[in-house]
Every structure is written in structure tokens, then in C-alpha cells.
Amino acid sequence: MDVDLIFKIAAVGIIVAVLNTLLVRTGREDQAMLTAIAGIIVVFMMLIPQIRELFDQAKDLFKL
């Protein structure tokens, strides 16, 4: 796993946390929840290629 990916995920988490806090304090709880969900989706989209690579390596390892 690349360290760069960990920093990207952390950056997305920090941005989402700040936006979530700002939106909750201004009384926009619905938009805060949507922002958190969007952050989770972005992180999952970043992880999909890594998961695919993991499964490919497992296939090669066990010769499936």
C-alpha cells in the first residue's frame, strides 16, 4: 500500500470533518449528513483499485 494513498484518505477525512462541523453549526444537518456520505463514497472509490489489486494477487498466489 502506498503511503500517498493514506495521506489522501486522511485529507478527505479532515476536509469532510471541517465541512461537517461548519454545516452542523449553521443548522444544516441534512447537508452535513450528505457531505459525510459523499466523503465515504470518495474514499471507497479511491480504495477500489487497491482492493482489485489485492484480489488479483490472491488469485496469482493460489493460482485460481
Image (tube, grey):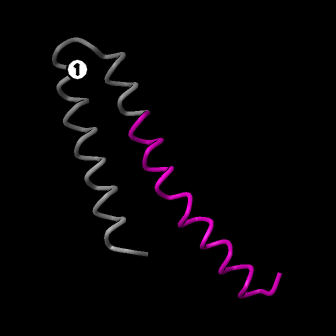
The C terminus sits in image quarter: bottom right
Q: Is residue 37 left or right of residue 56?
A: left
The N terminus sits in image quarter: bottom left
Query: Whole-percent x and y of residue 26?
Result: 17, 14
Q: Quadrant of residue 52?
A: bottom right
Magenta segment, which residues? 38-64
Query: Whole-percent x and y of residue 12?
Result: 30, 48
Query: Whole-percent x and y of residue 20?
Result: 25, 29
Identify whether 51 is placed above or below 28.
Answer: below
Identify whether 28 is placed above or below 13.
Answer: above
Residue position for label 1 = 24
Count of marks, rendered view: 1
Magenta span contains residue 40: yes
Q: Is residue 58 left or right of residue 51?
A: right
Residue type at mark 1? Val
- Looking at the image, the residue that sits furthest to the top is 27
Q: Does dot 1 land on a helix, a strand or a loop?
A: helix
Q: Residue at x 56, y 57 (%)?
A: 48
Q: Residue at x 50, y 50 (%)?
A: 45
Magenta span contains residue 20: no
Query: Whole-percent x and y of residue 31?
Result: 34, 19
Q: Quadrant of residue 30?
A: top left
Q: Quadrant of residue 21?
A: top left
CA neighbours of label 1 inside 10 A, class few (<14), some (14 to 19), many (20+): some
Q: Residue at x 60, y 73 (%)?
A: 54
Identify whether 2 is placed above or below 42.
Answer: below
Q: Residue at x 23, y 42 (%)?
A: 15
Q: Main secondary structure of the magenta part?
A: helix
Identify whether 50 is placed above or below 32.
Answer: below
